[in-house]
Amino acid sequence: MKIIQKKSLGQNFLRDKSILQKIISAGELTPQDNILEIGPGEGVLTKRLLSGGAKVVAIEKDKRLQAKNSPLLKLKQKYPDKLNLYFADVLTINLPEILQKENFTDYKIIANIPYYITGKIIRLIFQQKNLPSLVVLLLQKEVAERICASRGKESILSLSVKYFAQPEIVAHVPRQAFFPEPKVDSAILKLKPKEKIDRSQEKNFFRLLKVAFSSPRKTLRNNLKNVFNLPEKRWEEIFSELQLNERVRAEKLSLDDWFKLLKLLDNQFSSLHN
Ligand code: SAM
C-alpha cells in the first residue's frame, strides 16, 4: 500500500538511509530502550528502532495508515510485543496516561516530526512531569539553529528549550533526503534534559520571558517597566546587579542572567494576572 502524502499533515517521508543511521546514533539506541515516536508515517524510522531491539510506542494522526495492508500495520504484525500504535493527534491525546499505561517511566523520544507543529510538540515534550532521558528530533534547519542560538541571539523558543535541556545540532539534512522534497532543509537536533530542573520556578520563568520579549524592538528595561511597577532607583540597582547595560535588549541575556533576574523580581509576580 502506497500512501499519497498529505501536505497538511507535514508528510515528508525520509528516504535517505544514512540519515536514519545518524538519528539512531544520536539517540544512543540500546535494546533496553523505550522509545516514543511522534508521526511514524510509513514506519522507516520505526523499523530501525524496532530492529535495534527497542520497544516503540508510536502516535500517528493519519488514520489511513491504520489500514491492514499499511506498512505500519505490517510492522505491528512483525513486532507484536515491541510496537504499540496509537492513531491520534499527539497534541490532544492524553500523553501522561499513555506513558503510564506503557510503563514508560524511563523513555526517549526519537522522531521525524511534522514541521507545522514543531513548537507545540517541543512544548508538549517539556510539559511532561516525567521527562524523557533524551530527545532526538528531525526538524527544520532554521528552527534547530534558532533553538541552539548563541548568546546575543536568544529567543523565547531557545530559552524555553534551554530551561529544560542542552540542545545540540548533530547533523544537517538536505531537503533531497525526503519524499516529497520539502521547501526547506532540515537538521537532527539532540536535546539532553538537565539532571536538575527547578520546576517550581517554571511558571514565573515563562511569564518573565513573555513580558521581556513582548516588544522585541524595545529595551528589556522598558518591556519590564510596562508590567512590573518598581521605582526607578530599584531598576538601576537590578541592572547594576546583573551587570547589564540599561539599554540591553532581551535577546542578549543568557539563561543565567534570566535566573538572576527572576530572583530579583521574585516578589513581583503575585501582581501579574497571567
Ligand atoms: N516518521 C516518518 C518518516 O520519517 O518518514 C514520517 C515523518 S513526517 C515528517 C511526519 C508524520 O507525522 C506524518 O506521518 C504525519 O501524518 C504525522 N503527523 C502529522 N501531524 C500529526 C499529529 N498532530 N499527531 C501525530 N502525528 C502527526
Image: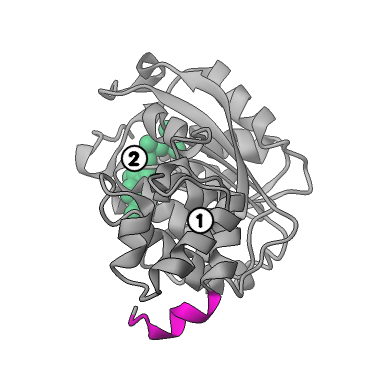
Kindly indicate the quadrant of the structure image that contains residue 105.
bottom right
The answer to whether 32 is drawn above or below residue 269 in the figure is above
The answer to whether 232 is drawn above or below residue 111 in the figure is below
Q: Give the side of residue 149 with respect to residue 115, left or right.
A: right
List x then y, in percent, for residue 104.
67, 63
The N terminus: image quadrant: top left
Q: Identify the residue under disc 1.
A: 239
- Secondary structure under the numbered disc 2 in the rendered image: helix
The answer to whether 185 is drawn above or below residue 223 in the figure is above
Q: Is residue 271 magenta?
A: yes
Q: Residue at x 44, y 21 (%)?
A: 15
Task: Write the start and end of the magenta stretch as one range.
Answer: 266-273
Q: Residue at x 39, y 67 (%)?
A: 232
Asked if one can make out residue 154 in the rendered structure from this viewpoint, the answer is: yes
Q: Choose between 261 and 91: the one closer to the eye.
A: 261
Q: Residue at x 53, y 62 (%)?
A: 237
List x then y, in percent, for residue 233.
45, 68
Q: Nearer the viewer, mark 2 or mark 1?
A: 1
Query: Dot 1: within a 10 Å radius of its alpha carbon, few (fewer than 14), some, or many (20 or more) residues?
Result: some
Mark number, residue 95: none
List x then y, in percent, for residue 179.
33, 22
Q: Is mark 2 within 8 Å of ligand 1?
A: yes
Q: Residue at x 67, y 35 (%)?
A: 51
